[in-house]
């Protein structure tokens, strides 16, 4: 960021807009930049007026229009930071907007640069092309390490070992400097040391507050999934994708995985389990929350999601039922002024070009609603199709569900239950066992095979309710998606002579 600021200021850019929640850290960075290029630095806020950072002198200017008039009296080669100034531009005051444009035009000739600092991007159309928008990245591990060292010194704690320090900084990645400092201090108060579990807990709470993404505490593993052997094998082969050995071997970082198929057959469960496979935190994105009512808010929300994911990286970004969040991109021009299309375009561009270790896992039930651009190679590494479970998979699912609710699979006729539940999804199998539990509980006994068989017979499976849709989904997947379960039958692969 420092080099970028120097380049923009030296090249005569008169208007910059820094989108950041870390006003103090940005201004400290700007102080260093101003010193390096010999510029005078000023900072304005509605409460403090215009402050000369070099000597601390203050000019009274409580009005946002008045400070613009003062800029004309400043010496050449000056940088003026305008704190929270975007809030005054939201009203569309024509006098204020015109004055800003005049000051920018004069600033190009006199080496004066206005920098608006705000937590979100809000510019009226008249000024959108007058300012260069900069996203100030969250602190990296070196910067977080400086904060950590300060807390350790203040609390008179011994220096952390390398492994402990790395674990703490991994847990703090994605926090602002102040948030990290607060989390470190809370850990010291709670357990007299810097505990990465406490840091991770506080990060989960902090990330969840923005309402866009949340960190999921994953308890599922591949053992929680019945079947899907091909999909499991694909994940296991990439288990060490973000390890130091992989960095030395230099394979390209995996981009992501799209799982389409019948609802209730383990798509979301697989996405959760992938976090356990990779040993990385799982971030869940609700795509619908990205879209906001204010102009520019949706694009700003997407940038915030990407910035958070890249700061926490290596991590897994999970988007459940992605088609629901992107379904409006095709008709966006006539329904929302193109917002959905712009957000979708920015998202898929990031997926194709990202270099950070963010593995995107997404699920979809209705592939017909997915834009074709999302399905091509380069967005996701692989597209898997999850069908209704076969006989062997149903047997495994019954064993998992029976054990999950504290019963022994050996006490049930697993083969018979698997046969009776043909055409049932994994979720329906679980619900059948839950129904049998309630029936047995009300009768004051333990559930048996007969109770479960009765519960099965009383259900109408999704394979009957949505027979036409499932048939269409299978037809689409043939030749387009990789089966999540290895197909049974003779090997149809090419024969290669020895």
Image (spheres, rainbow, N blue to C red):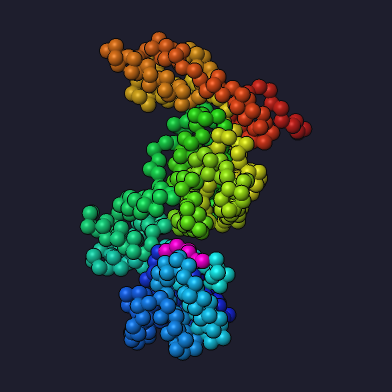
The stretch drawn in magenta includes residue 198: no
The relative height of residue 56 versus residue 149 in the rendered view (above or below) is: below
**Residue at (43% x, 49% y) in the render:** 213
Q: Residue reaching furthest top?
A: 450
Q: Position of residue 206 (x, y in %)?
A: 35, 54
Q: Which quadrant of the figure contains the C terminus?
A: top right
Q: Residue reaching furthest right?
A: 497
Q: For this view, does 46 lie left or right of residue 457?
A: left
Q: Position of residue 200 (x, y in %)?
A: 35, 51
In terms of image quadrants, where is residue 446? top left
Q: Position of residue 49 (x, y in %)?
A: 35, 79
Q: Which residues are magenta?
A: 117-124
Q: Position of residue 99 (x, y in %)?
A: 49, 78
**Residue at (48% x, 64% y) in the render:** 122
The relative height of residue 192 versus residue 77 in the rendered view (above or below) is: above
Query: 469 or 150: nearer the eye?
Result: 469
**Residue at (33% x, 18% y) in the render:** 438
Query: 253 or 244: nearer the eye?
Result: 253
The stretch drawn in magenta includes residue 121: yes
Q: For this view, does 428 lie left or right of residue 492?
A: left
The relative height of residue 238 versus residue 463 in the rendered view (above or below) is: below
């Amino acid at each position: 960021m420092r080099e970028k600021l120097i380049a923009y200021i030296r090249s005569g850019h008169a208007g910059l807009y820094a989108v950041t929640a870390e006003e103090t850290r940005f201004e400290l960075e700007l102080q260093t930049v101003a010193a390096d290029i010999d510029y005078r630095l000023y900072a304005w806020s509605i409460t403090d007026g215009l402050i000369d950072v070099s000597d601390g002198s203050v000019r009274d200017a409580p009005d946002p229009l008045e400070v613009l008039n003062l800029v004309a009296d400043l010496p050449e080669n000056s940088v003026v930071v305008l704190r929270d100034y975007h809030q005054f531009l939201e009203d569309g005051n024509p006098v204020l907007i015109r004055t800003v444009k005049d000051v920018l035009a004069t600033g190009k000739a006199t080496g004066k640069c206005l920098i608006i600092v705000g937590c979100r991007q809000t510019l009226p159309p008249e000024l959108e092309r007058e300012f260069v928008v900069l996203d100030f990245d969250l602190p990296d591990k070196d910067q977080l390490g400086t904060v950590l060292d300060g807390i350790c010194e203040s609390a008179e704690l011994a220096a952390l070992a390398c492994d402990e320090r790395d674990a703490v900084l991994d847990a703090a990645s994605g926090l602002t400097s102040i948030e990290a400092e607060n989390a470190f201090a809370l850990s010291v108060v709670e357990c007299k040391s810097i505990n990465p579990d406490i840091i991770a807990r506080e990060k989960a709470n902090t990330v969840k507050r923005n309402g866009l993404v949340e960190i999921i505490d994953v308890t599922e593993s591949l053992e929680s999934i019945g079947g899907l052997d091909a999909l499991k094998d694909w994940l296991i082969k990439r288990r060490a994708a973000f390890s130091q050995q992989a960095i030395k071997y230099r394979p390209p970082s995996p981009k992501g995985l799209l799982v389409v198929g019948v609802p209730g057959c383990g798509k979301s469960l697989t996405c959760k389990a992938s976090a356990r496979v990779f040993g990385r935190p799982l971030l869940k994105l609700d795509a619908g929350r990205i879209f906001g009512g204010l102009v520019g808010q949706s694009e700003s929300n997407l940038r915030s999601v990407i910035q958070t994911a890249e700061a926490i990286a290596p991590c897994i970004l999970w988007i459940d039922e992605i088609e629901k969040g992107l379904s409006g991109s095709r008709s966006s021009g006539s329904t929302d002024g193109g917002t959905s299309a712009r957000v979708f375009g920015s998202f898929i561009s990031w997926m194709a070009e990202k270099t950070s270790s963010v593995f995107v896992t997404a699920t979809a039930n209705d592939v017909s609603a997915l834009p074709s651009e999302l399905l091509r190679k380069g967005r996701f590494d692989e597209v898997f199709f999850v069908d209704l479970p076969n006989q062997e998979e149903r047997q495994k699912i019954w064993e998992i569900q029976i054990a999950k609710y504290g019963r022994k699979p050996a006490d049930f006729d697993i083969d018979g239950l698997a046969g009776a539940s043909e055409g049932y999804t994994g979720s329906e199998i679980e619900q059948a066992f839950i129904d049998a539990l309630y029936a047995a509980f009300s009768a004051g006994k333990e559930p048996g095979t007969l109770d479960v068989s009765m519960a099965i017979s009383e259900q109408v499976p999704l394979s009957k309710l949505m027979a036409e849709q499932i048939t269409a989904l299978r037809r689409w997947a043939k030749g387009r998606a990789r089966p999540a379960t290895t197909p049974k039958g003779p090997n149809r692969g090419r024969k290669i002579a020895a």
